[in-house]
Image (cartoon, rainbow, N blue to C red):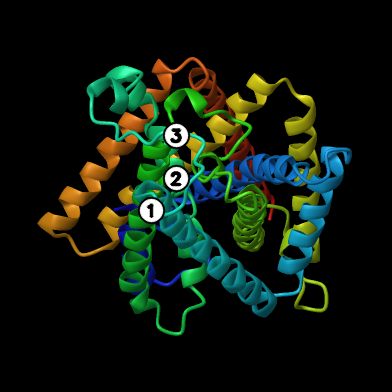
Amino acid sequence: MVFDALAQMTANHPEKGSFRSYAKKVFGSWAGFGSGWIYWFSELLIMGSQLTASSIFSRFWFPAVPMWIFALGFAIVSLLVVFFGNKGFDRVENILAIIKVAAIVMFLVIATALLAGWIGGGKFEAKVPLSYNDLFPSGGIGLWSAFIFAFYAYGGIEVLGIMSYRLKKPEEAPKAGKVMLLGLAALYVLSIGLAVTMVPLSAFNPKESPFVLALTSDHLTFMPHLFNGVLIIAGFSTMTASLYAITSMMITLAQEGDAPKVFSKKWKDKYPFNALCLIACGLVGAIMMSLWLPGKVYEYITTAASLMILYNWSFILLSSGRLLKPSLLSGMKRWVGLVLIGLAVAGTLFHALSRPGFFISLLIISLIALSDWIVQHFKIKTKANQ
């Protein structure tokens, strides 16, 4: 629903700033400022967690190497990919996307072979979860509080909106995006369904991938290494796409006076050196927080970042109601989407680890709102003096 609204706005009103520009057009400068900076900070914080995850996976092969070295290495490579422009970025992301999809398909094939008994030596006995306790081990409240994590899996749709501006035919964005999202949803459901069928709930843990656990077999000793590599590739790909998006967002914010003008300038009119320098500093800070803050504190911050993505989704849905031609179906989808977002946000209040993240997200938004007030105050004062 959110992507459909964003893609329809892109098709009818192509804007370089994507959802941020639509919010500004509909609700005013405060909404454009808030939407842009909320997205920028949320993605930057999430990228820190992605770097940490990729570093943890890398230590599977090199346990003696400090995590910060891996995190720094991945960050530098990602910055270089974005620095050298759209062609290199597109090429890298296309290759990584093929690898990721191929890996998921391979998981489905091998998992099916294990379930069918064509491959022996499995670590766990398969059991289809059919009872209420199997499906909802934490009850209805647990399901409700898990909404935020399910929504987070689709947090990259804003990147699609930003990149759709580059399409030769933006009107094709809604159709292409729907096909892609339906395909991803099918792969997600099938792969997760097989994983929970093949691995008991008690065996899941934060240090091992559920897919690696599901494929653990005496005859498949190579699988942990293979999927560990795939997980690193997936994390790097997602992080690089986010980096591209927040670089574009920073340039747009600077061009429209919502960030210092220096970040809109490009070296040799081609390379976004200044914007990437700012983001590099932010990444260093995010890496330091992820490595040095107590585990639960950093989880609170990343949960807050995930919630801020949902707040931006609300901006997208509300903006579409004003920019697109009204219809009964689009109106129903918009309000259903807003209700689901509201449920996901409210669900965090019922989870001990998510609840502090909710209040941290409100604090960050309050600071962004205060910054907007200060910026607008100085703009008005400057105009008055002129």
* Mark 1 residue type: Thr
Q: Quadrant of residue 88?
A: bottom right
Q: Which mark is residue 312?
A: 2
Image coordinates of residue 1 in percent, x first then y, are 29, 53
SS at mark 1?
helix
Q: Which mark is residue 112?
A: 1
Horizontal arrangement in the rendering, residue 36 relative to residue 322 (left or right): right
- Give the Cα distance between marks 2 and 3: 35 Å
Earlier along the polypeptide chain: callout 2 or callout 1?
A: 1
- Give the Cα distance between marks 3 and 1: 13 Å
Earlier along the polypeptide chain: callout 3 or callout 1?
A: 1
Horizontal arrangement in the rendering, residue 318 relative to residue 87 (left or right): left
Horizontal arrangement in the rendering, residue 80 relative to residue 95 (left or right): right
- Mark 2, Cα crowd under 10 Å, few <14 / some 14-19 / many 20+, is many
Image coordinates of residue 59 in percent, x first then y, are 78, 42
Residue at the image position 40 percent from the left and 46 percent from the top: 313
Earlier along the polypeptide chain: callout 2 or callout 3?
A: 3
| Residue corresponding to mark 3 | 199
Q: Is residue 154 above or below residue 122?
A: below
Q: Nearer the viewer, residue 304 or 375?
A: 304
